[in-house]
Structures are given as C-alpha cells and as structure tokens.
Image: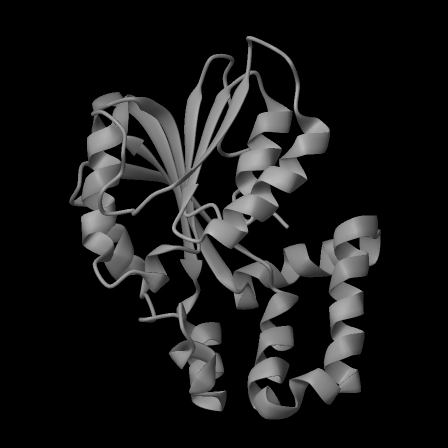
Amino acid sequence: MLTVDFKHFPLKDGDRLLDLGCGEGRHAINAYIAGNIDVFAVDLNPSDLAIAQQRQQPFAENSTAKSFHLQCADALKLPFPDRCFDKIICSEVLEHLPDYQGALMEIQRILKPGGTLAISVPRAWPEKICWSLSSAYHQVEGGHLRIFDSQTLNRDIENFGFKRYRRHWAHALHSPFWWLKCALWHQQDQSRLIRWYHKLLVWDLMQKPWLTQTLEKLLNPIMGKSVVMYYHTEDTV
C-alpha cells in the first residue's frame, strides 16, 4: 500500500533516492521496481529491515543501472554525506520521532539542490478520533508521539528551505478500520467485524476493484487517513 504517489514524485534514470524510516520497504521496493535508480532505505528496526530485504529479493536485478541498499540508521544521525540524494521519501515517520525537526534538518543536509521531498503524516482529525477511542493506540512502544496540524508542519518544513508543490490525502478506507480497532482495542483479535474489514482492505489492495478505488478517491479529501505533501528545494522555484 503506497502513500506517496509516484505520479507526483516522478523518478528519473540515475536518481539516488532515500526512503527514510522505510519500515518493511513498501516505497523503497516500488521505487526500485519503477526506475533505473539507486535506492537507499534506512530504519531503526532490524526486523523490519529483514522483511524489506526478503520482499525485495524477487525483484532484484543484476544491473549496473539500479541498486538497492538497506541500512539500520537513526534519522537524526544519517550516515550519508551532504547533498547526496536527488529524492527523499519520509512516509509516516515524523509522528514517531521526539525531535522531528532534527530529522528535517538532516533531510535538508543530505538532499541535493534541486532535489524533491515527499512527506506524509497521519491527518489530524482522523488521528484525534483514534486517540480519543484508545490511549493504548498511541502509548504502545514506537507509537505516535504527536498529532500534526498539516499547516503547522508545512510551515516547519518550508522553514528548512523547501517549497511545497502538491498536497493530497490518502487511505480514506483505512480511517474507519482504525477507528474500529481503537474502539475495540482489547477485543480486536476476536472481532469478526475487524477481520471482515481487514479482508476488504486486502481485497482492495490486491484486486483494485473499480468500486472501492473510486470510493476511496472520492472520500480521500474528506477523510483520508494520511496527508501527503511534496516539496522542491527553494533553489528550483
């Protein structure tokens, strides 16, 4: 399930792309498949990196035109030189970090002039419902530390020298799913309704039926669970 839309974040041959906080590799792997680029993906969780490595293997190519690299690294101390990436994805990461502005400073340091950045975070009002329904939702280890107001976050990002060129919302059908999980937090493993809804989301992901795809597009501006923002460095504006 991709949150960043590569139609708005086009890849060019020879790009060096960083997926910062890659998790199990969904964006990094799709970027590797989509273009002749060098993909670097970092995360603090070794288990997630192992899953990402396993999932990438069926798509691995013996080619000098592209490469795929995984590394365990801290978003506040990235092991890369200044101005070395053409593109950076940071999807559903900043809400987990105590010092998210420190991560933005590192992004500013390693992104090339003329580079592009895609950032997504949970949208404020669906997230507030989750927090109100279950304190455990955000108090678990590695949980969400804050609820972002997208306008405030945008100002923070632009203060680091970026200029937003597009914004959209994503995953509207996931909002009710998480509200259900939060409302039934301690019984979610036994809930038939949650199991049914999960099957629906998997079916939508795998089959991409017209009905649910159209419904999500219509609902995303209203109740999309994530807000996705795309930036150029100010050098290009």
Image quadrant in which the C terminus is located: top left
Q: Position of residue 51 (x, y in %)?
A: 60, 47
Colour logic: one colour
Kindly give the residue lying farthest to the left in the view shown: 159
Q: Is residue 176 visible?
A: yes
Q: Position of residue 64 (x, y in %)?
A: 55, 8
Q: Is residue 237 visible?
A: no
Q: Quadrant of residue 88?
A: top left
Of residues 102 and 118, the one drawn nearer to the viewer in this rendering: 102
In this rendering, the answer to whether 202 lies above or below 165 is below
Q: Position of residue 178 (x, y in %)?
A: 59, 75
**Residue at the spot x=16%, y=45% of the render?**
159
Kindly give the residue lying farthest to the top in the view shown: 64
Of residues 124 and 17, the one drawn nearer to the viewer in this rendering: 17
**Residue at the spot x=41%, y=77% of the render?**
138
In this rendering, the answer to whether 65 lies above or below 199 is above
**Residue at the spot x=45%, y=74% of the render?**
127
The answer to whether residue 165 is left or right of residue 196 is left
Of residues 64 and 205, the one drawn nearer to the viewer in this rendering: 64
The answer to whether residue 162 is left or right of residue 194 is left
Q: Position of residue 141 (x, y in %)?
A: 40, 73
Disc count in the image?
0
In this rendering, the answer to whether 160 lies above or below 61 is below
In this rendering, the answer to whether 148 lies above or below 228 is below
**Residue at the spot x=62%, y=90% of the render?**
184
Of residues 118 and 165, the one drawn nearer to the viewer in this rendering: 118
Q: Quadrant of residue 194?
A: bottom right
